[in-house]
Image (tube, rainbow, N blue to C red):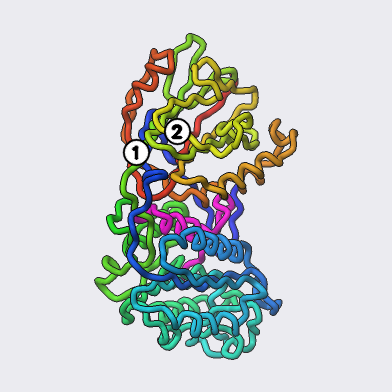
């Protein structure tokens, strides 16, 4: 499917995670093991996103409001990592100059030095056509001919003067392409740079911008968010600091992760920028990830079976013909939850695990038990590829605790019509579900090379071949295998 490229964000190629067949998934331990205690500190956040504006001279955007809602939802999911949270969300009509200014100048004043402050702004950045030396964030009620009186003036140190915290993170996913004055790109770039440069003199203040001031920021339909926000959430979820011993994500870790991911996804067309006091990015904490007492290990492998009953690893390099059989087997070493999704070659979405016939459908699995999918544990039942050729994708998700959002996604799949399940479901809906899944599960484990499994024909010997290892931090993980489905 062709990618939809919209101003503010940029299309890019998503690099599929190369899943080796035999793997050992190492997660933080499931109940009764708990996350190690986190340092004290509260979280204060102001989240703003706009696609709609009262003034028709201001060009509408596409997914800024969804980006803000998704980022806010992410913060709510992480509230257990802080002693208390104070979250404010302003989207479209609620994102007025008065509301945003009051939230920034008054709502954050209670934050202490050990608290975390996050400000997320997604929308338009602009320079005043009459005074191009002033930089503004455009709100819903901004008037193009009166930015000073109707927009949020950004380039002033007083903006954060009342915040005592030494952990203030500004996240700017703003377009500097003019908004309503296409001729002002250079002026906007200059003044945006001036504003962000303030952070180079403010201790404990860090700004991460989605692009250079003279670049556009873009979106990719496959992510369901802007490219910047997509990787921002994944980074803060744990990808940016996989092995953090204390659960802290530093400004440097977050920046380096987001920078390289966005650059790769946009073919070097968009470069996120970090602004902070020189030499402080390494030791300035900007967020937290969970740290656990013990790891949880789950042995997993995807396999296929040829016409001669020979078993093979199913990997991203695999090519299977219609009629070929495949399955998945895994063994957890602690109680946890497992979910398996299948996006088939037609764009239809289905669940491989838990099976509809299971009583609670929660995906709960028990330590020390060998599981074979589909359903039976004897290895005699297999999935069989139909005649619809194309790319097949299987996602394997593991979570230390029951994940209600994943189960809500199951409900979306369950509510699909029979026609959708038979392959007539549009790929747009499939992509949206895939993007939602990616947002819910932020960590992709690293694998080591697997060992070949040729010639093994029974589940017992197959499980003995599970020797490979994945090590991750965090509460949950997702990895995938993509393989080609061709005609016989």
Give the labeled residue for mark 2.
Answer: 366
Question: Which stretch appears magenta?
Answer: 212-241
Q: Position of residue 243 (x, y in %)?
A: 30, 51
Q: Residue at x 51, y 48 (%)?
A: 438
Given residues 419 and 10, the one toward you in this image is: 419
Q: Which image quadrant is residue 66 in?
A: bottom right
How would you rate the neighbour count of disc 2 (Cα within 10 Å): few for under 14, some for 14-19, many for 20 or more?
some
Give the labeled residue for mark 1.
Answer: 470
Q: Position of residue 16 (x, y in %)?
A: 46, 41
Q: Which image quadrant is residue 208 in?
A: bottom left
The correct choice, above or below, for 231 with respect to 42 in the image is above
Provide the secondary structure element on which disc 1 rests: strand
Looking at the rendered image, the disc whose residue lies closer to the viewer, 2 or 1, is 2
Given residues 248 and 84, the one toward you in this image is: 84
Q: Residue at x 40, y 45 (%)?
A: 32
How would you rate the neighbour count of disc 1 (Cα within 10 Å): few for under 14, some for 14-19, many for 20 or more?
some
Q: Is residue 135 something one can see in this rendering?
A: no
Provide the secondary structure element on which disc 2 rests: loop
């Amino acid at each position: 499917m062709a990618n939809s490229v919209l101003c503010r964000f940029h299309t890019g190629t998503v690099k599929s995670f190369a899943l080796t067949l035999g793997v050992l998934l190492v997660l933080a331990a499931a109940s009764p093991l708990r996350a190690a205690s986190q340092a004290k500190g509260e979280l204060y956040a102001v989240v703003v996103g706009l696609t709609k504006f009262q003034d028709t001279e201001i060009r509408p955007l596409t997914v800024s409001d969804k980006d803000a809602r998704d980022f806010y939802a992410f913060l709510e999911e992480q509230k257990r990592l802080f002693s208390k949270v104070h979250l404010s969300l302003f989207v479209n009509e609620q994102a007025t100059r008065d509301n945003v200014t009051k939230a920034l100048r008054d709502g954050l004043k209670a934050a202490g030095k050990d608290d975390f402050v996050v400000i997320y702004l997604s929308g338009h950045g602009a320079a005043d056509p009459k005074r191009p030396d002033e930089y503004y964030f455009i709100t819903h009620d901004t008037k193009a001919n009166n930015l000073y009186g109707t927009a949020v003036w950004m380039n002033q140190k007083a903006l954060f003067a009342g915040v005592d915290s030494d952990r203030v993170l500004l996240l700017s996913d703003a377009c500097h392409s003019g908004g309503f004055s296409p001729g002002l790109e250079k002026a906007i770039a200059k003044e945006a740079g001036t504003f962000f440069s303030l952070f180079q003199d403010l201790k404990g203040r860090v700004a991460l911008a989605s692009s250079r001031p003279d670049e556009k920021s873009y979106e990719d339909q496959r992510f369901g968010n802007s490219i910047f926000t997509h990787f921002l959430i994944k980074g803060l979820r744990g990808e940016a600091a996989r092995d953090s011993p204390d659960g802290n994500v530093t400004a440097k870790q977050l920046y380096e992760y987001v920078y390289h991911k966005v650059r790769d996804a946009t073919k070097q067309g968009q470069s996120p920028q970090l602004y902070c006091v020189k030499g402080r990015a390494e030791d300035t904490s900007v967020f937290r990830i969970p740290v656990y007492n013990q790891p949880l290990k789950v042995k997993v492998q995807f396999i296929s079976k040829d016409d001669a009953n020979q078993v093979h690893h199913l990997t991203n390099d695999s090519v299977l013909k219609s009629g070929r059989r495949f399955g998945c087997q895994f063994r957890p070493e602690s109680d946890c939850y497992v979910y398996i999704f299948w996006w088939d070659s037609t764009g239809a979405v289905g669940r491989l695990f838990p099976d509809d016939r299971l009583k609670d459908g929660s995906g709960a699995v028990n330590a020390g038990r060998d599981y074979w999918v589909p359903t039976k544990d004897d290895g005699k039942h297999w999935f069989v590829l139909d005649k619809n050729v194309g790319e097949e994708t299987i996602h394997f998700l593991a979570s230390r605790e029951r994940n209600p959002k994943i189960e809500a996604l199951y409900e979306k799949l369950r509510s699909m019509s029979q026609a959708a399940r038979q392959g007539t479901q549009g790929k747009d809906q499939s992509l949206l579900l895939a993007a939602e899944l990616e947002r819910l599960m932020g960590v992709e484990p690293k694998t080591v090379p697997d060992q070949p499994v040729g010639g093994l024909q029974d589940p017992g010997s197959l499980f003995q071949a599970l020797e490979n290892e994945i090590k991750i931090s965090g509460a949950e993980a997702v990895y995938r295998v993509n393989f080609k489905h061709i005609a016989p």
